[in-house]
Amino acid sequence: MKVLFLNPPFMSRYGKFSREQRSPAVTKSGTFYYPMWLCYAAGLLEKNGFEVKVIDAPAKRMGLDEVLLAAKDFSPSLTVVDTSTPSISNDVSVAVEIKKNTGSFVVLVGTHPSALPVETLKINESVDAVVRREYEHTVLELASLIKGGTVNKEGLGRIDGLTFRWDGEIIGNKDRTLSEDLDFLPFVSDIYRRHLDYRDYFYAHSRYPIITLITGRGCPHHCVYCLYPQTFNGHKLRYRSIKNVVDEIEYCLNNFPGLKEIMFEDDTLTVNKKRAVEFAEEILRRGLKFQWSANSRADVDLETMKALKKAGARLFCVGIESGDQSVLDSMKKRLTVSQIKKFFGDAKKAGILIHGCFLVGNPGETKETLQRTLELALELNPDTAQFFPIMIYPGTEAYNWARENKYLTTEDFNEWLTPEGLHNCVISRPGLSNYELVEFCDVARQKFYMRLSYIAKKFIQGLSNPNELKRLSKGAVTLSKHILKGSLKSKKARNC
């Protein structure tokens, strides 16, 4: 039986819409994520004897007509369509067209239907079902049911994690227990190699070409804005074995010519410091020579960072968010400004670069706290930085806070993006409007990147390595357009 996994077309006129990132959009930097979760599910189904096809339409800038031709040619019995909050109307429309053209059972996956399963199914009655949260095993059970020819209410009703439509009724089954045995899943990089083109994916802060992997799932922290732990993979940490992870690293190094970096997209790779050191020790024991980057918190000690640097760590992507302690506390960051400063000093000693993320507009934010954030960003001077207003999504505490306080400028998810696919600031409150948040991010971005000292540092960094110069140039050209013109074309604009 054939199963199609589709990252649907959207915004192809303006760039590559990065659906799987934490704040889906066409990015200012050109960053574009792998459809990792789709590929994990595709790999598990292949392992169980199904014929699968993965289409990443944004990666190839494919339009709907091209996707429909490919889908009809493949003729799947089941189609799994990825979604996101700002693209949900488009994603449902694509799913409906796929169903019309192939007759396949169509199911939607991702963070949005996980948070709003019933509301998502009500968008169009042609969509058969949605899968909530991590979906590999749910999709496998669904495919097995379809293959067996027993698609009925009783059979669908036995699949945990599924919300489905039957005779006009929407039925939500119980939640699926999240998988503990992550080593059971096939290498996601094998699906990348056989179904995608790894040169289509780009991280502005990392070396190109890049492969994205994970060593574990879940995050124990409870930041109010963070999407995936609250809607998709939970707060309980579940790990792959160190051996399994490093086996996959070796697979990548042997099968992706010219690979320059591996990005570990765990919510926080360094949360378990003992395991992080064991990871580094296994890389060194096998004599693997490669550079890698990872998501981290600003609480890693110097000894751990030195061990990771020795094993190839090049850069950490770190959520700083705010320079004001009361704002950090209100977002449940569980970090102090003094911890952040010490972390940056230790990272410099260890020789690890930092991509700093600054998120403004959180509960308790004022014009004064915004200024403290900019001052901290300039003081810390990370290798690269991003400034953006808080983006909120259904299923998160931040979304509930904004709705309950009537801070949303719109409840139309289509307006979560600008007409060009960029993030749109949809939170406005007395004393700090969405316009002012966007304006601050524009000013902060300009002040950070237009410093002569920063430009000189990046120029010297690029001269040291031709490949690094190429990566820096690509990111700079894309980002500079937005830095120079800003996000606000008029006082009526609301884009960020």
Image (cartoon, helix red, strand yellow):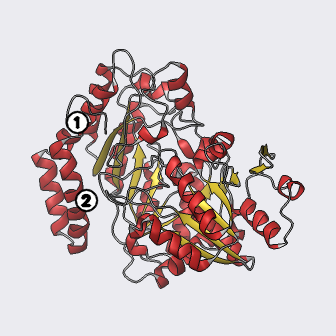
Residue under the image location 54 percent in, 58 percent down: 94
Residue under the image location 29 percent in, 54 percent down: 29
Foreground: 381 or 475? 475
Whether tag 2 and tag 1 are in contact, CB under 8 A, the answer is no
Does residue 374 lie above or below 34 as drawn? above
Q: Which residue reaches farthest right?
A: 154
What percent of the width, then of the height, locates residue 475? 25, 59
How many marks the image carries: the answer is: 2
What percent of the width, then of the height, locates residue 418? 34, 42
Drawn side of residue 286 relative to residue 496, left or right? right
Q: Earlier in the sequence, mark 2 or mark 1?
A: 2
What percent of the width, then of the height, locates residue 302? 42, 50
Q: Amino acid at mark 1?
A: Leu
Q: Which residue reaches farthest front?
A: 100
Drawn side of residue 95 relative to residue 414, left or right? right
Distance between mark 2 and mark 1 Cα atoms: 21 Å
Does residue 280 lie above or below 72 as drawn? above
Q: Which residue is mark 1?
A: 488
Asked whether residue 11 is in view, the answer is: yes
What element does badge 2 sit on? helix
Drawn side of residue 327 relative to residue 377, left or right? right
What percent of the width, then of the height, locates residue 305? 43, 55
What element does badge 1 sit on? loop
Q: Which residue is mark 2?
A: 475
